[in-house]
Image: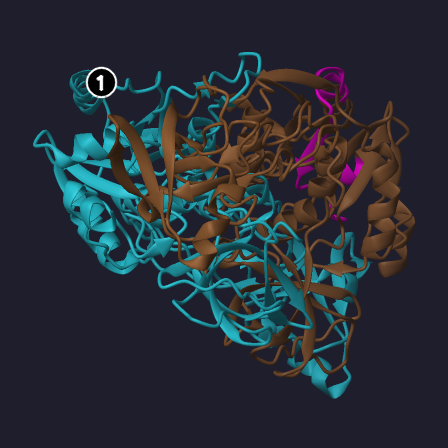
Chain colours: A brown, B cyan
């Protein structure tokens, strides 16, 4: 019967990396849009941003104290205190009002502009106030080196330096840099609009009472969360019908309004597997319909008018993995993220994994640090149909094809999931 | 002059942990609200959720194949094939229509309910179809063990099991569990409403042209991002004025409408430090106004009518650290997160850090894995006034008070920042 299966859908199993490579050319860049700075939080920068001016853009005082000529303090070296007349006061945000002459000082606050002619700031606490002939003076007893407590122009960035590369996710650090340079309208990538369909007449809506033999549609909500997390904008639709012509019409209509279509279920070899039928027809160009991986070996991708269709397994665990390995990188690439794949780490397997397979397994698991070393702990229940352990997983542990499994203590590659480490 | 400083604001420096402990009793739980399941993505669960039914709630077929009596296959053991009559077909979502008798089988799809009387499912691919007297039969040549390819009721969860604890952040895994159990309205914690003020007449708005001696207000946007990331709802206000009565009025008005007030700047000992004056007055109860840490030693917290006021440093680096160490845990605790502090890891210092200090330093840095081991790399520029390295930081490296600094290769504690690891 296996022969028949292979024939019916011409399934040629591809390794994960090859399947990913088939998808990426179709992950075309979305448009850009301008948003306000607060709205830019969490978005992907569309264009590189150069510094429009050096930063700091003036010589800044790093202390509350007095701007002085350091040369006035050389006599302190020999134990001779020096008195300087205070002739100006410079709060942060002001510019010096008086041109300082040797023997003079200006009271200055942290962050204020140091007078051009001064070359050092002495800390307030290192001075003593003295009235001389009715004029305020400060008394210094230590020599001050040139440049002391002055942040030079451009210490952090010169004009024209790239401050942020395109494709970068904007969080607190990036947002504060943009604010600093007055970039209050930010060019970001539009979020890919993703249509999500389930298939399968066994599915109840989440607000329906339970029925014998039927399960609730959890996968579209799983995908809603995964798409949101990946930076896409999910749109949930009614289930695809078990009728090929209607299914085609539904998918084609979705492609007119959305950038990507993701379905879940109906990709096996069963008699009711509408997506397997759909992608093997001529309404779409199939990229692959089998991958040498567990779970999710029937994960399928196709192209329609240059847009990607992902037909993921209906098993929750396989749907989850299929999204992370194929849909997430496509969404990321559409937004110009340089490395849109799950990050790969090396860890030590904390518990032996004995399930054998001729396909690569992506086993859900937790990550733990012990004394600076990374350990991966496979979930007890990681069948493709199992949904409950998704929420406790930090990573997918990559178990290569093997007749023996992998022993505790061996090195494994793990793919870090977004939001993991849960354990911390 | 240091004596004077200590007197003026009665500054007694507290260690970070003590300062945190002073805050937490005032981080009172927000109200709960009900949201739809998609809206619950990223929110914090307000109440524990018990499984309203076992999962799976019926005996589920793990394969496309045939439901049978395993006892019918015992003769296969001796090399004798067996023929079973196919009397029913059970797609996923249907319930069996025929009561099976020994010698009979039901065609069944993955995920469908197994007839109560059957005790095994044989894979489609292990069978051969045979017509006998006009009736469809299957031919089996291998013995099938009882329970084969049947997922028992409650394999993942029993009725009444806690599926999710209160205080848990809801992402893809949690959302799919809630969908599975039909929990389509979700009790979540209201997001704490946080009023954000800057102080300082040196600040330009982010849409103003640059002026000599003045800088743009980047800290309120930094805080906007940090608050959003921490789960709070930020509200940005005009700067607090340099007039004590007006400043008090602004802060008091904010407390009427918001859960927490955060200010940035004006906490030093300078002549224009309005927040330092405000918290030392009697309009609020000061919790602390000095912490034995760098940057941000002047980080200040107070209570007004049971609500928290955080007066963070105006230096970008110090503002950032002050938020992560004090404001983030308060927001997290208000939403019932069990561990609201930055997660602590141990890492090896990859480069010597020689700056000495009698306070604990929280040095921005990157994290890197090399062969499963965690390394921490301090940023080159980590002065409190430096803003540019915030965006490239994965963690705060904790450098204890020391006369010598810490050498490369020594173990250090690092506090993982949200969103880090950037390097991956």
Helix, strand, or loop for circle 1? loop
Q: Which residue is drawn at 54% across and 58% down?
A: A394
* Residue B205 horizontal/vertical position (percent): 47, 16
* Residue B69 horizontal/vertical position (percent): 58, 69
Q: Quadrant of residue A3?
A: bottom right
Q: Residue at x 38, y 24 (%)?
A: A87
Name the foreground residue: B153 vs A236. Answer: A236
Q: Which residue is disc 1 drawn over?
A: B243
Chain letter of the residue carrying label 1: B
Q: In which quarter of the image is residue B43?
A: top left
Q: Give the range drawn in magenta.
A: A252-277
* Residue A195 horizontal/vertical position (percent): 65, 26
Taking the view exactly as shown, the residue that stands out farthest to the front is A133
Q: Which residue is drawn at 84% across and 39% down?
A: A24
Magenta stretch holds residue A333: no
Q: Is residue A17 among the parts visible in the rendering?
A: yes
Query: Within 10 angstroms of label 1, few (less than 14), some, or many (20 or more) residues?
Result: few
* Residue A185 horizontal/vertical position (percent): 60, 16
Q: Quadrant of residue A257?
A: top right
Name the foreground residue: A247 vs A56. Answer: A56
Taking the view exactly as shown, the residue that stands out farthest to the bottom is B78
Which quarter of the rendering shows the N terminus of chain A?
bottom right
Instruction: Indicate whether A352 appears above or below A151.
Output: below
Q: Which residue is drawn at 29% across and 20% down?
A: B240
Name the foreground residue: B273 vs A144. Answer: A144
Which quarter of the rendering shows the C terminus of chain A?
bottom left
Seen in the image, is A244 located left or right of residue A217?
right
Magenta stretch holds residue A259: yes
Instruction: Indicate whether B181 appears above or below B349.
Output: above
Name the foreground residue: B121 vs B210. Answer: B210
Seen in the image, is B46 located left or right of residue A337?
left
Q: Is residue A217 among the parts visible in the rendering?
A: no
């Amino acid at each position: 019967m296996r022969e028949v299966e292979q024939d019916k859908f011409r399934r040629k199993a591809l390794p994960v990396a090859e399947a990913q490579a088939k998808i990426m050319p179709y992950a075309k860049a979305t448009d850009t849009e301008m948003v306000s700075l607060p709205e830019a939080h969490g978005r992907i920068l569309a264009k590189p941003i150069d510094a429009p001016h050096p930063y700091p853009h003036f010589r800044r005082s790093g202390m509350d104290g007095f701007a002085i000529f350091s040369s006035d303090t050389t006599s302190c070296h020999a134990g001779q205190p020096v008195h300087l007349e205070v002739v100006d006061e410079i709060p942060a945000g002001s510019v010096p009002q008086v041109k300082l002459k040797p023997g003079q000082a200006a009271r200055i606050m942290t962050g204020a502009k140091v007078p051009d002619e001064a070359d050092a700031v002495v800390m307030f606490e290192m001075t003593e106030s003295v009235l001389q002939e009715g004029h305020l003076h400060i008394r210094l007893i230590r020599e001050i080196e040139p440049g002391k407590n002055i942040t030079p122009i451009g210490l952090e960035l010169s004009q024209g330096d790239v401050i942020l590369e395109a494709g970068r996710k904007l969080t607190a650090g990036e947002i504060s840099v943009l604010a600093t340079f007055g970039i209050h309208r930010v060019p970001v990538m539009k979020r890919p609009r993703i249509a999500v369909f389930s298939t399968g007449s066994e599915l109840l809506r989440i607000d329906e009472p339970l029925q014998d033999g039927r399960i609730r549609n959890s996968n579209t909500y799983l995908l809603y969360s995964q798409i949101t997390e990946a930076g896409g904008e999910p749109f949930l639709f009614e289930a695809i019908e078990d009728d090929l012509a209607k299914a085609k019409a539904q998918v084609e209509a979705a492609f007119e309004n959305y950038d990507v279509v993701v379905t879940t279920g109906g990709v096996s070899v069963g008699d009711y597997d509408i997506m397997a039928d759909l992608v093997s027809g001529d309404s779409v160009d199939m990229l692959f319909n089998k991958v040498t991986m567990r779970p999710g070996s029937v994960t399928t991708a196709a192209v329609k008018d240059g847009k990607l269709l992902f037909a993921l397994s209906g098993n929750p665990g396989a749907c989850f993995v299929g999204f992370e390995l194929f849909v997430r990188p496509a969404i990321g690439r559409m937004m110009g993220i340089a490395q849109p794949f799950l990050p790969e780490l090396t860890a030590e397997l904390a518990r032996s994994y004995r399930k054998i397979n001729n396909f690569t397994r992506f086993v859900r698991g937790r990550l733990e640090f012990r004394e600076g070393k990374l350990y991966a702990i496979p979930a007890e229940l990681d069948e493709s149909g199992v949904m409950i352990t998704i929420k406790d997983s930090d990573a997918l542990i990559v178990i290569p094809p093997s007749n023996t499994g992998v022993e505790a203590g061996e090195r494994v590659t793990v793919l870090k999931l977004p939001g993991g480490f849960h354990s911390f």
